[in-house]
Image (spheres, helix red, strand yellow):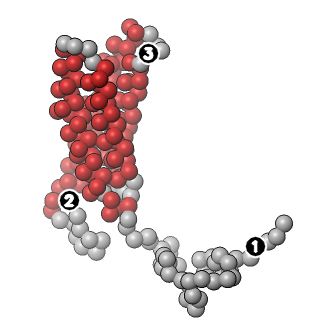
Amino acid sequence: MHAPGQAPTARETTIRRWLPIGLRTAAFLLLPWIVVLSLSVRRFGARNLANSWVWLDVMEVAALLLLAALVRRRHRATSPLAAATAVLLAMDAYFDIWSAHRGPDYLLAQVLAYCAELPGAAVLAALSWYALPWAAAEPVAPPGRPPRNVGAAPSGRSGSSSRGPADEAGQALRISGP
């Protein structure tokens, strides 16, 4: 991770180039699984718990694709979305193992959980931590306006003013009565 004024390191450049590709690949690999799952759900009827697995996987695909776009841009929403997607993957792993029947279904649920979903959740949790400085970047002032000093008292006044709230230019706001 580099400071705002410095050039990114070779490691960060590599991560920012390959991580979105990995996220998109994971999302596209989930699509055939969603099709197979949705076709197998039909035999149980429309109002069944199995339908929720299909929609959970659809949410994971949407989150992974959106996250790939956000990582590429170093967007400030990367950290919360990475954390939410990590929770989705961990929840999917837990409920897959919890709801699988003994035999090959249980073995498949364990393999997917331990080899794909939980490692993916760990990577996304690390990404969420790594992307925190992107959300805390210095605010950029609009063109033609000087940057605001957040938390500082307006010039010429102490921190406690009896004049009431002030607008951005430091002028007292007039509050009209009823």
> Label 2: how many residues lie within 10 Å, few (<14), some (14-19) or many (20+)?
few
Residue 7 relative to residue 95: left or right? left
Q: Residue 133, image x and y in percent? A: 32, 63
Q: Position of residue 16 (x, y in %)?
A: 24, 54
Q: Residue at x 24, y 51 (%)?
A: 126
Tag 1: amino acid: Ile
SS class, disc 1 = loop
The residue tagged 3 is 48
- Marked residue nearer the N-terminal end (1 or 3): 3
Q: Which residue is mark 2?
A: 13
Q: Pick the residue in front: 70 or 149.
A: 149
Give the label on residue 175, or none: 1
Rendering coords of residue 7 (x, y %): 22, 70
Query: What's the CA distance linking mark 1 and mark 3?
Result: 56 Å
Q: In this image, 155 relative to 123: left or right? A: right
For the view shown, which residue lies furthest in the bottom direction? Answer: 156
* Disc number lying in front (2 or 3): 3
Q: Is residue 34 left or right of residue 22?
A: right
- Do callouts 1 and 2 mark residues in contact (Cβ within 8 Å)? no
Residue type at mark 3 is Asn
- Residue at the left extreme of this rendering: 10
Of marks 1 and 2, which one's residue comes earlier in the chain?
Answer: 2
